[in-house]
Image (tube, rainbow, N blue to C red):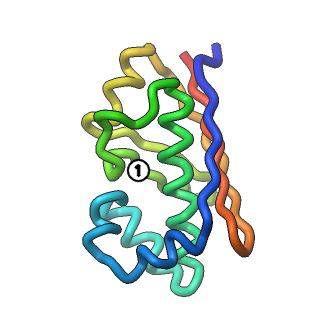
Amino acid sequence: MIVGFGIDAVAISRIRRWMEDEGLLARFFHPQELRETKSRGLTAVYSLAARFAAKEAYGKALGTGLKGITLKNILVTNNPNGKPELTLLGDAATPFKRICGTRIHLSLTHESNMAIAAVILES
């Protein structure tokens, strides 16, 4: 049963400014996300923007926002086929467990100036 849906959009320019601040990136992104996206060269900023949108969309799908959640504990990766997946660590997993969550669906997209993510939570 679907228990939550969230969607978020992030301006690529916002994340492009963050690319110059390693401390800011480390605050919002898991080290694995940074390694994987930075290996993409010029398209890294698009990947990071989509991942940041996914974190925000997760909070919206919970219906509680991200209060009390460390953003880098929401890890966005791609499976071997390229499908994005959301992994919850530490304090990011607590509200998902509270709603008896069983499955997370994630979709990401980006264009020249925007990245968008949608999250569906099942229980």
Where is residue 2? Give x, y as percent. 64, 18
Q: Is residue 64 left or right of residue 111?
A: left
- Residue lying furthest bottom in this view? 42
Quadrant of the rendering where the C terminus is positioned: top right
Where is residue 40? Give x, y as percent. 52, 80
Quadrant of the rendering where the N terminus is positioned: top right
Q: Is residue 18 left or right of residue 22?
A: right
Where is residue 35? Give x, y as percent. 37, 72
User: Would you place residue 103 above or below residue 88 in this image?
Assistant: above
Where is residue 27? Give x, y as percent. 28, 60
Q: Is mark 1 on a helix, strand or loop?
A: strand
User: Image point 29% across, 34% down: which residue?
Assistant: 68
User: Image point 51% across, 77% down: which residue?
Assistant: 16
User: Would you place residue 81 above or below residue 54 in this image?
Assistant: below
Front residue of 54/18: it is 18
Near mark 1 (Cα within 10 A), the count class, few <14, some 14-19 or many ≥20, is: many
Query: Residue 21 falls in which quadrant of the image?
Result: bottom left
User: Image point 70% across, 58% down: which residue?
Assistant: 109
- Residue lying furthest right in this view? 111
User: Would you place residue 51 above or below residue 67 in this image?
Assistant: below
Q: Is residue 3 left or right of residue 37?
A: right
Q: How many labels does the image show?
A: 1
Q: Name the residue under label 1.
A: 75
User: Would you place residue 45 above or below residue 29 in this image?
Assistant: below
Q: Which amino acid does label 1 sit on?
A: Leu
